[in-house]
Image (cartoon, rainbow, N blue to C red):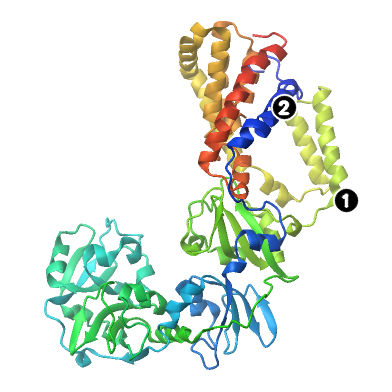
Amino acid sequence: MRERGLKPFGLFDFTPVGLAILAAGILFMVTAGRKLLPRREVGPVTSESSHLSQVYQLHERLFSLRIPPQSGLDGISLGESRLGTALGIQVVAILRRGRRRLAPEPATLLEGGDVLLVEGRRADLRDLMKVRDLKLQKTTAGQLPRPVKGVTGVRLRLPDDSKLLGQSLREIRFRERFSAVVVAIHRGDEYIKDDLARRTLRKDDELLALGARAQLERLRSQNALRLKEVGLSVLRNVWDHLFMIRVPKGSALVGSTVGNSRIGELVGVTVGAIIRGGMTHLGVFADAEIQEGDGLLVSGDADQIVRRLGMGDLDLDPGIGGISIETDDVGLAEAALAPRSSLVGRTLKEVKFRDRFGLQILAVWREGRPLHSGLANLSLRFGDALLLQGPWDRIRNLGLDADLVLFSRAERRPRRTHKAPFALAGLLVMVAMVVSGFQPIHVAAFTAASLVLLFGTLTMEEAYRAIEWRVIFLVAAVLAFGSAMEHTGAALLLANTVTGLAGPWGEYGVLAALVLLTSLMSQGLDGAPAVVLLAPVALNAGAQLGLDPHTVMMSVSLAASAAFMTPFSHKANLLVMGAGGYRTVDYIRVGTPLTVVILILLVLLVPIFSPQGL
């Protein structure tokens, strides 16, 4: 406006219209808006830890496991045991010789006699108990009975342009899709045999698989795979890593299928064949039934298989109950993803959440309900709230992280109340400088911020993190874009379009069109860039019809803040999404009529409070 020879807005020029919008917004929300809000259970914004456990239904999922003496888990670390991966549980505490250790680290060594307080589903433990009687035997190619006719092996290579790259065998459903069972992955000089279903495929990987010859021959026509070799000889390099797991009489696995037994997931192996009745049945699929006396030919690491089978020694411990999962040093807290967080769209495994923050996630609040299962592979979304357990000092550090917003009030970093007068003084200095006309707003704000820092009200690190750098760079980019629009005539073209369409409706019609265009743009873009982008358009459109530029610019500025229709239009919308249990459709249902009310008020009131009117 100054560049066009116009007087800029003062600090309180927006106050009359702003107060009217505030009153209308409150009135709308306590009447019609309140009825439009969803009726569903919500998570707390700030609450004590006991209430957090209740809301996230944590106590319903807590139970205890006892590690008996001489268990296969004795002497290995919590991370190596893979208890969480195999059973979908979280170990929240370890009780050992009367002492309680909360939020144990992955490097914590387990001992016989330990009692593990875990969060999960008791039903999942039944699957683990099925493997407690299985016995591991080393085997060689010569010891195996002859294979069933028509079954063979293949070596498959992943080309550079394969669509399977970056996915795991489980994600692409390799068995069902290609009718073959992968028993090893040849990567460089290494043959990978364990946890194959979770391995992410890479360029130049070679897959060693078993299956029916007729089905495997069809792989020659697959663009995602290159068939390099056919025949059982492809297994010559993995025989040393093939083992047989014998299913004894009375085993709980008898009668179940390979898929339903979850033996591959629990023990970390791939079942490549079943030895039954003097025959080796290769290329076993998930629907194959396990019978008494079967020998399951599996590939994997011997030590790891023994450890996994040792997990079957775990026993439910009904005598342990009412254990608190908090102490003076360890507790529960709730946090949400910050606006434009780098965690959005990524899984906890990808960001290595435990390693980065030193905290474990017990549940995720999404769309009005808690999620407990499969958290490691859950892609985080806008509005997710996280239930965290860990040391209080690490929880407090979340307040300094730009990706998360800590909701638990009592656990935030202590307030420096003795510095409050300096913060208030900085605010008053800024207001006084602007109101008196001594300095423009940007100089006054910079001066106040400098004073706040000089008096130690904020540290430089806190000040740096508080700045919305992305918005600053976005505004800087849009400034250039807005200038280009004006100099190239694009702004004039848009202005002609607006006046051409809305001109027949008169001055108020053009003003309404500009306000509506600004509000719609701000639903997906921050308010400041939207104003910068539309400023030349609004001024040109107003000039064509002789509208007062101050009236036009104030309408556009305030309309850019009427962004209630999506959770992404403003960071305040995102911050309440998870805590309120809201969904995107809720913002459309409540925010759309509210936006309409605000825009109508702007069109009616701004000309009234503007000295020149329209």
Dot 1: element: helix
Indicate whether 255 appears above or below 581. below
The residue nearer to you, when weighing 378 against 28, is 28
Circle nearer the N terminus (2, 1): 2
Indicate whether 76 appears above or below 572. below
Please tell me in which quadrant of the rendered image residue 148 appears.
bottom left
The residue nearer to you, when weighing 189 against 386, is 386
Q: Which quadrant: the C terminus? A: top right
Q: Which one is in front in this view, the residue at disc 2 or the one at disc 1?
A: 2
Q: Is residue 440 left or right of residue 136?
A: right
Q: Position of residue 158 (x, y in %)?
A: 26, 63
Dot 2: element: helix
Residue 493 visible to the viewer: yes
Mark seen at residue 23: 2
Q: Which residue is mark 1?
A: 418
Please tell me in which quadrant of the rendered image residue 478 appears.
top right
The residue nearer to you, when weighing 99 against 7, is 99
- The residue under the point 26% across, 70% down is 207
Residue 438 visible to the viewer: no
Please tell me in which quadrant of the rendered image residue 113 appears.
bottom right
Q: Which quadrant: the N terminus? A: top right
Query: CA gap, disc 2 to disc 1?
Result: 35 Å
Q: Position of residue 151 (x, y in %)?
A: 15, 76
Q: Is residue 271 left or right of residue 357?
A: left
Badge 2: residue crowd in 10 Å (few <14, some 14–19, many ≥20) = few
